[in-house]
Image (cartoon, rainbow, N blue to C red):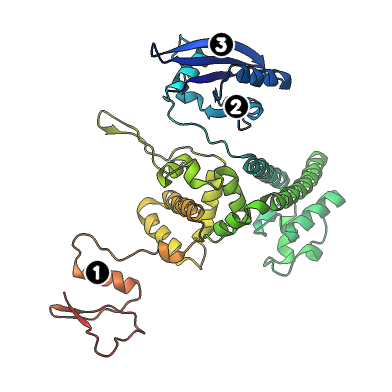
């Protein structure tokens, strides 16, 4: 039980604050102060001053959209402990709900420590990285939308560059599209724009360019191409800013970059979402994986199990780690990842196998940051089975799959060794089976 705390119900233009005090003699909670403040900067300064006058050092508020952020930043300066909680953990029953009751309910649950868990609010330097990485992802989504729009313009005009080019927006495709925009049509010789790597012949390009472009489509193509260039420059500026802001975390970025499938941008994006303090923030790897949305849900009633799909987790982190998993299974430096993926894919399919690899990588990320050590492929290799009883046939198949030669005799097994290893003089090579 806390001696004094404050519950805050956050809205767009105002907040409702209630101070609760624990009466140790009567063993009950009393709500002594109730105030309404504006969410303008002046109103938030008044709110903080009001807390200091009432000697209230603990504040809990709902995470209502983005409206809680200025409230949190106005009071969380070290002298006041501010906690943010998801509304689902403090939701009032229907029919017994208003602003004042919501604030009192938050204060009462916060004082009794009945709130399941609090939201993770990283420090300011991590938040600065998060702002840029999330905006970079939005920029990439906008780039994809403009490419789709430009491709649709070509399709409706009967121009089939996608039939002769693997990447329509590579050097060859971009040059041809720009020439279409400049000349206002598609009747020209495409040979000067074709790169040496392209397998299609110039005659095939002429056939693919046999279309009809209307003035309206041509204008849309011009605007879309200009926006693509703008977004490309914006993406480059964001990445340059990320490099300068992430210098304080160079050690952690180098550690994460040693893992398969994780490059510089992925490492910065991961740090921007989870921070670098694994023990203080999450405590255990199970809680960390659950927060990331990498574990199955529990949904069972009356002995019947319903969907066990993985949870939503962090919607900004999950795409990054899944993309890293897709890259990891293609890496030749880490065959153990590919082997694990192929084994799971045969039984569960591509989607579940990729999620399993993503969970494997996030487990590695947790312990790399926790122990301040780089990724080691030896730790990820599958060890020989050491529990229960195993048939001799399966044991031999296992060692043969690992490239180890095993020679058997009646009632005896010669000690398993790599082909290029010989026993030393005087060393016994036989063991009882």
Q: Quick one: label 1, few (<14), some, or many (20+) residues within 10 Å?
A: few
Which residue appears at 32% of the width and 86% of the height? 422
Disc 3 element: strand
With respect to residue 182, does 414 lie above or below? Answer: below
| Tag of residue 395 | 1
Percent of width and height locating residue 232: 75, 49
Q: Quick one: label 3, few (<14), some, or many (20+) residues within 10 Å?
A: few
On screen, residue 274 versus residue 125, left or right, reads left
Q: In front: 378, or 408? A: 378
Identify the mark nearer the N-term, 2 or 1: 2
Q: Can residue 98 be seen?
A: no
Q: Which residue is mark 3?
A: 33
Percent of width and height locating residue 54: 59, 16
Percent of width and height locating residue 319: 55, 46
Q: In front: 374, or 30? A: 30
Image quadrant where one finds the C terminus? bottom left
Image quadrant where one finds the N terminus? top left
Percent of width and height locating residue 379: 41, 63
* Separation of marks 2 and 1 at Cα, in angstroms: 56 Å
On screen, residue 334 versus residue 157, left or right, reads left
Q: Which residue is mark 2?
A: 65
Identify the mark nearer the N-term, 3 or 1: 3
Disc 1 element: helix
On screen, residue 371 versus residue 252, left or right, reads left
With respect to residue 69, does 213 lie above or below? Answer: below
| Tag of residue 190 | none
């Amino acid at each position: 039980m806390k001696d004094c705390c404050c519950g805050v119900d956050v809205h767009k233009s105002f907040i409702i604050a209630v101070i609760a005090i624990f009466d140790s003699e009567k063993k009950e909670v009393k709500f002594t102060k109730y105030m309404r403040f504006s969410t303008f900067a002046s109103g938030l300064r008044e709110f903080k001053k009001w807390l200091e006058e009432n000697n209230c050092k603990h504040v809990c508020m709902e995470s209502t959209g983005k409206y809680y952020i200025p409230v949190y930043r106005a009071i969380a300066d070290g002298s006041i402990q501010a906690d943010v909680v998801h509304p689902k953990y403090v939701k009032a029953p229907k029919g017994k709900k208003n602003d004042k009751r919501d604030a009192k309910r938050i204060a009462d649950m916060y004082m009794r420590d009945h709130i399941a868990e609090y939201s993770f609010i990283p420090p300011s330097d991590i938040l600065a990285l998060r702002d840029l990485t999330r905006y970079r992802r939005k920029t990439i989504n906008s780039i994809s939308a403009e490419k789709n729009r430009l491709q649709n313009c070509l399709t409706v005009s009967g121009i089939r560059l996608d039939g002769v080019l693997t990447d329509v927006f590579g050097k060859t495709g971009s040059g041809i599209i720009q020439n279409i925009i400049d000349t206002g049509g598609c009747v020209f010789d495409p040979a000067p724009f074709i790169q040496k790597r392209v397998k299609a012949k110039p005659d095939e390009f002429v056939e693919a360019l046999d279309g009809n472009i209307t003035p309206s489509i041509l204008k849309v193509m011009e605007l879309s191409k200009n926006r693509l260039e703008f977004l490309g420059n914006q993406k480059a500026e964001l990445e340059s800013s990320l490099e300068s802001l992430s210098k304080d975390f160079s050690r952690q970025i180098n550690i994460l970059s040693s893992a398969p499938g994780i490059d510089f941008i992925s490492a910065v994006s991961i740090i921007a979402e989870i921070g670098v303090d694994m023990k203080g923030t999450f405590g255990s790897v199970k809680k960390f994986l659950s927060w990331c949305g990498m574990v199955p849900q529990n949904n069972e009633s009356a002995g019947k199990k319903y969907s066990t799909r993985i949870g939503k987790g962090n919607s900004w982190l999950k795409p990054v780690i899944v993309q890293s998993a897709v890259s990891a299974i293609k890496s030749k430096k880490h065959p153990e990842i590919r082997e694990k993926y192929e084994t799971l894919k045969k039984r569960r399919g591509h989607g579940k196998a990729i999620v399993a690899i993503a969970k494997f990588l996030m487990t590695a990320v947790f312990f790399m940051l926790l122990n301040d050590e780089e990724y080691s492929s030896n730790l990820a290799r599958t060890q020989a089975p050491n529990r229960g009883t195993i048939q001799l046939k399966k044991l031999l198949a296992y060692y043969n799959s690992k490239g180890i030669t095993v020679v058997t005799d009646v009632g005896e097994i010669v000690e398993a060794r790599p082909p290029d290893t010989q026993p030393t003089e005087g060393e016994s090579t036989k063991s009882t089976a």
